[in-house]
C-alpha cells in the first residue's frame, strides 16, 4: 500500500498525463481509450490554467501531413475508412501512418461484419475473416523488424496478430506497446484478454507505471482472484480516485463474480445515480436482477436503456434477460442474437444464448453458443460449466467431467462446480473422487445446500450407514440453523433416513424425535406415523418383558457410532 501511495503521490502529474494521452488517442480515433482516460481524469480535481500540459510538439513530417491528416480524420470519423486510407497513403509521419493502417484494418472489419450480418446467422460468425489482416501483418512486421513502430502502431500490430490467432507473438507485441506508451489503456486491455493464468501474468515484464495498478486490479478480477482485486481497487480509491465511476463499476463486477449479490446491487444502484445514462456494465446489473427474480426492476432497467440506445449490445442483453425471466425463451434468444449481430465478440451474449437454447432443449445450438463464448474468452467458467450441463443432458459423463474440470480450475472455490464434478464422478462409479468433491463443496461454502445431501445419499448407496447418518445430521442442523427447513424439500428425506437409522441402532428417543419431525412434511408424514407406532410397540414390549431379560438386551445394544441429532433448540 505504501508503495502504491508513493506512485500516486502526485495526482497533478497523473492528471497532466491523462490530458495528454486523451489528446493523442483522440487524434488517432481510439475512442474507447479516450473514454476510459476521460472518465479517470474527470474523477480528479481540475487543474489551474498555468498547470495545463502544453500541446504536443510538431515535427516537420507532421507539418507536411497536416492537411491530408485533417481531411482523412474527417472521413475516418464518418466511418469512410477506405476513403481515409486513400488520402493517407503517401504520408510519412507516425500519426498519419497509424491512421492509414488503422483505417485499412477497420475497413476490413466493417466489411467482415456486413458480410456476416447479410449472409449468416450468429452461430456461423467464425467462418468470415477480415481479408486485410494478412497484408497488414506483412507490412507491420517489416516496420517492426526495422524498429520503426511507435506505441500506437505496436498496439495495432498486436491486434492484427491476435485476430490471426498468433497469440504468443501478440502478447510479446502488446508488452512492447505498454513499454513504448504506458498510458494507452487499449494496449493493456488487449493484453488482459490474452493472459490465461496467474503464472503467465507473473512471467510478463511490464512497465513500472501507475496505470499498471489499474491493469493488475482488472486482471485479478478476470482471473477470479476477487480478494486481491478488491484490495487493489480499495488502494486506488484511497490514492485519490474515489470519484471514479470506472472503479465503482469494476468493484460491482467483482462482487458479482463472487455472488455477493447485495453488495453488487448496491454499487450498481449507486453507479446509476452518479451516471444515469450509462449503458456499460448494465448487462451485468441485469444478471443480478435476474438471479434475484426482481421483475419490476429488470423491466424498468430494460425500458430505460431502450430509451437511451436500443441498438447497444448491453441493451439487447438486458431485454434478453427480461424475457428469459418471464420464461419467453424464444424471444430472449432473439435478443441475444441481436446483441451478437452488433458485436460478435460479446462474451455475455454467447453464454446467455447458450443458456436459452438449453431451456429450449436445443442442445446442439447450446453447444455451439458455449464454444463460441470460449473462443472469445477461455476464462469464462460459465461457458465451460454450460457445456458440462449440456453433455450431462446428452448422458455423456466423460465429456461432462472434462468441461466441469475446466470450470473448476477457473473457479476452484465455487461449490456448484465441485458438486457437478462430484455427480460426474459418481456416474462414472469413481466414488472416492465423488466423495472428495462433495465434501470440498461443503467446506468452501455450499451455495445451493446440496453437497452434504448428495454425499449422504452416496454413502447410503454404498451401505455406509454411519457416514450417511453423520452427513444427514450436519445437513439438517445447517438447514435448521438458517430457518429454511420448511422450504427445503430434502429435509424430510434426511429425517426419514435418520429415524430408521436410530431405530435400527435402538436409539429410540432420537428415532422418535425424527419421526415426529417427519410428520411436519406431507411426503414423509405417513412414514413418520408408522415409525412412531413401531417405536411405541417396541417400548410396550420392553416394559412388558420381565426384568431378567434386560441384562442380555443391554449387552447386545450396539455402541452409539453417531452423535444424536439435537433438534430441541430448533422449531420448524
Image (tube, grey):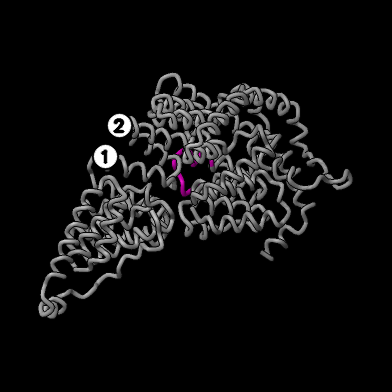
Q: Residue at x 59, y 49 (%)?
A: 251
Q: Is residue 192 visible?
A: no
Mark 2 crowdedness (10 Å alpha carbons): few <14, some 14-19, many ≥20 = few
Q: Percent x, y for residue 6?
A: 73, 62
* Quadrant location of the N terminus in the rendered image: bottom right
Q: Main secondary structure of the magenta part?
A: helix
Magenta span contains residue 28 = no
* Residue marked by disc 2: 361
Q: CA distance from mark 1 to mark 2?
A: 9 Å
| Above/below status of 259 relative to 538 | above
Q: On the picture, is 99 further left or further right than 168?
A: right
Asked whether residue 483 is in view, the answer is yes
Give above or below for 64 relative to 438: above
Task: Write the start and end of the magenta stretch as one range.
Answer: 159-170
Q: Which is more toward the observer, 451 or 151?
A: 451
Asked whether residue 162 is drawn in magenta, I would say: yes
Q: Residues within 10 Å of mark 1 (few under 14, many from 20)?
A: some
Q: Residue furthest top?
A: 118
Q: Are marks 1 and 2 in contact (CB under 8 Å)?
A: yes
The foreground one among 93 and 372 is 372
Q: Looking at the image, which residue sits at the far right?
A: 50
> Which residue is pictured at 51% across the width and 36% down the height?
294
**In the image, what residue occupies the spot 35% across and 54% down?**
418
**First in sequence: mark 1 vs mark 2:** 2
- Residue highlighted by disc 1: 393
Q: Secondary structure beneath disc 2?
A: loop
On the image, which quarter does residue 280 sit in?
A: top right
Amino acid at each position: 500500500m505504501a508503495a502504491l501511495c508513493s506512485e500516486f503521490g502526485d495526482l497533478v502529474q497523473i492528471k497532466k498525463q491523462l490530458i495528454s494521452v486523451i489528446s493523442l488517442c483522440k487524434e488517432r480515433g481510439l475512442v474507447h481509450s479516450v473514454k476510459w482516460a476521460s472518465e479517470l481524469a474527470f474523477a480528479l480535481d481540475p487543474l489551474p490554467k498555468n498547470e495545463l500540459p502544453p500541446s504536443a510538439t510538431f515535427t516537420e513530417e507532421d507539418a507536411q501531413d497536416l492537411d491530408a491528416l485533417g481531411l482523412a480524420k474527417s472521413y475516418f470519423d464518418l466511418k469512410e475508412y477506405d476513403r481515409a486510407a486513400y488520402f493517407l497513403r503517401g504520408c510519412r509521419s507516425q500519426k498519419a501512418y497509424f491512421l492509414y493502417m488503422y483505417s485499412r484494418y477497420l475497413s476490413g472489419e466493417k466489411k467482415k461484419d456486413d458480410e456476416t450480418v447479410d449472409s449468416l446467422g450468429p452461430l456461423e460468425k467464425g467462418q468470415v475473416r477480415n481479408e486485410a489482416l494478412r497484408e497488414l501483418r506483412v507490412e507491420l512486421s517489416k516496420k517492426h523488424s526495422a524498429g520503426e513502430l511507435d506505441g500506437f502502431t505496436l498496439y495495432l500490430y498486436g491486434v492484427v496478430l491476435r485476430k490471426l490467432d498468433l497469440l504468443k507473438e501478440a502478447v510479446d507485441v502488446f508488452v512492447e506497446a505498454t513499454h513504448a506508451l504506458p498510458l494507452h489503456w487499449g494496449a493493456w486491455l488487449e493484453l488482459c484478454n490474452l493472459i490465461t493464468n496467474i503464472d503467465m501474468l507473473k512471467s510478463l515484464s511490464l512497465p513500472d507505471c501507475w496505470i499498471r495498478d489499474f491493469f493488475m486490479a482488472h486482471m485479478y478480477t478476470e482471473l477470479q482472484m476477487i480478494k486481491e482485486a478488491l484490495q487493489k481497487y480499495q488502494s486506488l480509491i484511497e490514492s485519490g480516485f474515489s470519484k471514479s465511476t470506472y472503479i465503482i463499476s469494476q468493484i460491482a463486477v467483482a462482487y458479482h463474480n463472487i455472488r455477493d449479490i447485495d453488495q453488487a446491487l448496491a454499487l450498481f444502484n449507486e453507479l446509476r445515480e452518479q451516471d444515469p445514462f450509462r449503458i456499460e456494465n448494465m448487462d451485468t446489473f441485469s444478471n443480478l436482477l435476474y438471479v434475484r427474480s426482481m421483475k419490476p426492476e429488470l423491466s424498468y432497467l430494460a425500458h430505460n436503456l431502450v430509451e437511451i440506445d436500443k441498438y447497444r449490445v448491453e441493451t439487447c442483453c438486458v431485454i434478453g434477460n427480461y424475457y428469459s425471466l418471464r420464461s419467453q425463451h424464444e424471444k430472449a434468444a432473439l435478443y441475444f442474437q441481436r446483441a451478437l449481430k452488433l458485436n460478435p465478440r460479446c462474451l455475455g451474449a454467447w453464454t446467455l444464448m447458450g443458456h436459452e437454447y438449453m431451456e429450449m432443449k436445443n442442445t446442439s445450438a447450446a453447444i455451439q453458443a458455449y464454444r463460441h463464448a470460449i473462443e472469445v474468452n477461455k476464462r469464462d467458467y460459465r461457458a465451460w460449466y454450460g457445456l458440462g450441463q449440456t453433455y450431462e443432458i446428452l448422458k455423456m459423463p466423460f465429456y461432462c467431467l472434462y468441461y466441469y474440470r475446466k470450470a473448476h480450475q477457473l473457479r476452484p472455490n465455487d461449490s456448484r462446480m465441485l458438486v457437478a464434478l462430484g455427480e460426474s464422478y459418481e456416474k462414472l462409479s469413481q466414488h472416492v473422487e465423488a466423495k472428495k468433491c462433495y465434501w470440498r463443496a461443503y467446506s468452501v461454502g455450499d451455495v445451493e445446500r446440496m453437497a452434504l445431501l448428495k454425499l449422504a445419499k452416496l454413502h447410503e448407496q454404498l451401505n455406509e450407514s454411519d457416514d450417511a447418518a453423520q452427513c444427514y445430521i450436519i445437513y439438517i442442523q445447517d438447514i435448521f440453523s438458517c430457518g429454511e427447513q420448511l422450504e427445503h424439500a430434502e429435509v424430510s428425506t434426511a429425517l426419514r433416513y435418520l429415524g430408521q437409522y436410530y431405530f435400527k441402532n435402538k436409539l429410540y428417543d432420537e428415532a422418535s424425535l425424527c419421526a415426529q419431525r417427519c410428520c411436519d412434511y406431507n411426503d414423509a408424514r405417513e412414514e413418520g406415523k408408522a415409525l412412531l407406532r413401531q417405536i411405541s410397540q417396541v417400548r410396550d414390549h420392553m416394559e412388558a418383558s420381565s426384568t431378567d431379560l434386560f441384562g442380555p438386551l443391554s449387552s447386545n445394544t450396539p455402541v452409539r457410532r453417531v452423535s444424536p441429532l439435537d433438534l430441541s433448540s430448533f422449531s420448524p
